[in-house]
Structure formats: structure tokens, C-alpha cells
Image (cartoon, grey):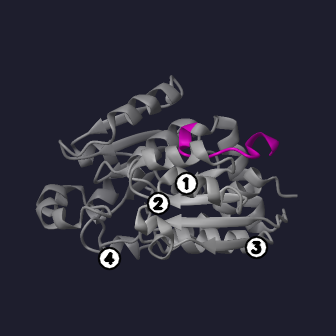
Amino acid sequence: MTGLIGRDLLGLADLSRQEVKDLLQMATQLKSQQLKLRCEKVLGLLFSKASTRTRVSFTVAMYQLGGQVIDLNPNVTQVSRGEPIQDTARVLDRYLDVLAIRTFAQQDLVTFASYAKIPVINALTDLEHPCQILADLMTIQECFGDLDGLTLTYVGDGNNVANSLMLGCALVGMNVRVGIPQGFEPNSAVVQQAREIAGDKSQVILTDDPQVAAKGAHVLYTDVWASMGQEEEANDRMPIFQPYQINDGLLEVADSEAIVLHCLPAHRDEEITDAVIEGTRSRVWDQAENRMHAQKALLASILGAS
């Protein structure tokens, strides 16, 4: 996929509809081992936020491509002592082939990418989580085949996952409904961008009624009610978000073949019940595994693996 070689992925809108489809196809072929690629490059992981799935999936994906990984924990680098982003970026640019960054402010990621010539991948910011959504779309495609015309309902906080889901669904022709309490809506600029991408191919709908959001949906999706950095707000948020819990009652409103997704980690019996996440409709563990396959396809495409 030569079109992605050397490019950054700072947000899902950096990709075209066709590029998303190509990445999903490659990820599927890599997972089934129909396709085997080698790429003896070096990936750096610069993570300012805690991580399990993103860290491990990127690491294993790069190793399976034949490359190496350097974990650049900010606590043991000069980043923790206040080295300017532009200085770190220009130095790492001369050591690494690609860098995945997990940080708070989207602007820090943008600044880093502007000073580094190597490709920079958004491994999560407060605004977006594009790599998660590539794995989500792959999982949905495995369950339903064609993505076009499906409806995904996200209920909960209007966080980075909600932002990227709107963009990702719009890119592949899926309808997306965001069921969310007033005052916790997704980023308004991202909502507008997603609607522009969707055009007349699909819909991007916001509602404060979780039942309306879930009615007839093919996918029910949620995330924690308080993201990293918002833990102190968790107790105050709980009564506000309780009606948006994914439980058996909400699942009954959805399509009879609906699946349930959660990007993890999950607070069981808060945003999702234990019965649902462990139930027959849950595809959460496939979704987690697919992080590795989707990111392997992304790395292979950006680095020109063969």
C-alpha cells in the first residue's frame, strides 16, 4: 500500500475511505496468515499515559514484522525533565523509523510530527484514538461482512473513542449514533467533520436518549465514564451516566444479532454489566486481539513492508 508510506496518522481523517478499507483487508490477511510481511525497522513508543493493549499490541506487531521496539518511558527520558517537544522530536527522528505517541494534548502530537521527519502515529490523545477504531471496524467486519449501512451506537462519555468512532464509521459508510448526557457531548468540530465525511452515505446522530440511540443498532459500544485524568470526577459522574449503561435491557432494544464492544479497561457493572461483557453477544476479546492485527497492517503500510 504505497499511498501510506512515510505518512503520519494523527487522526482518522488523515485516511481516505479506500485507505481504511485497504488497511482492514490487509489486517484480515495478516491475521489469517494469507499475507506475511517483513519489515526490519525500529518502532519507538513514547507513552505518557498508562497502557496495556496499545503497548503490547504495537510491540508484538512490530516483532512479528521482524522489527524492533524501544519503549521510551517518559519517566526515564529527558522528557520528564522538561526537554522541549521539538528537541526530543528532532533527536528521535535520527534514531527511529517510526514513532507511536500516547499523550494528553492533541497539539503536542501535532507539534511532534511537525518537527520529526519519520512517521508519527497517534496511539491515543485526549482528542482521538484512531488505532482503536481500526481494530473495532475490523471486528465488526468479521461479524457482519460488509460495513456499509450498519449502525453503531456508542453510549457514555463523549471522549476520544467517541470522537474517533464517529470519524471511522463515517469513512466506511456506517451510521453512528452517540447516546450521551447533555454537557458531555463529543468534540463539536469532530462531529461536524464526521458529518461532512459521511455526506449522504450515512448518518452521524447525537441524542441524550440511550433507548433511541440503541434501537435497532447492530453494534453497542461503550467506554469508561471517566477517562484517564478524570478519575476524581468518577463518583460525581456515576448517577448522570447510569441510564447509559449497556445491560440486558439496552441490548434488547438493539438488533437481534447485535454485538457488544468495549475498548477496555472495563469497570464492570458501571458502564457495562458483567453479564453482558461475558455474554454471547460480546466480541470484546476479539476486539482486543484485533488491535495487534490492525496495527501490524498500519505499520507495514507506513513502513513499506514487503
Cα–Cα span, label 4 and label 2: 44 Å
Cα–Cα span, label 1 and label 2: 7 Å
Counting from the top left corner in percent of width and height, residue 211 is at: 25, 48
Type of the residue with mark 3: Gln
The residue shown at (67%, 72%) is 69
Q: Are marks 3 and 1 in contact (CB under 8 Å)?
A: no
Near mark 3 (Cα within 10 A), the count class, few <14, some 14-19 or many ≥20, is some
Q: Which residues are magenta?
A: 1-13
Nearer the camera: disc 3 or disc 1: 1
Cα–Cα span, label 3 and label 2: 33 Å
Cα–Cα span, label 4 and label 1: 46 Å
Query: Counting residues from the N terminus, which is met first, the one under dot 3 or under dot 2?
Result: 3
Query: Counting residues from the N terminus, which is met first, the one under dot 3 or under dot 1?
Result: 3
Near mark 1 (Cα within 10 A), the count class, few <14, some 14-19 or many ≥20, is some
Type of the residue with mark 4: Asp
The numbered disc on residue 87 is 1
Q: Which residue is mark 3?
A: 64
| Quadrant in the rendering for residue 36 | bottom right
Nearer the camera: disc 3 or disc 4: 3
If the image is split into quadrants, where does the C terminus sit?
bottom right
Residue 171 drawn in magenta: no
Counting from the top left corner in percent of width and height, residue 200 is at: 51, 23
| Quadrant in the rendering for residue 191 | top left
The residue shown at (62%, 68%) is 58
Query: Counting residues from the N terminus, which is met first, the one under dot 4 or under dot 1?
Result: 1
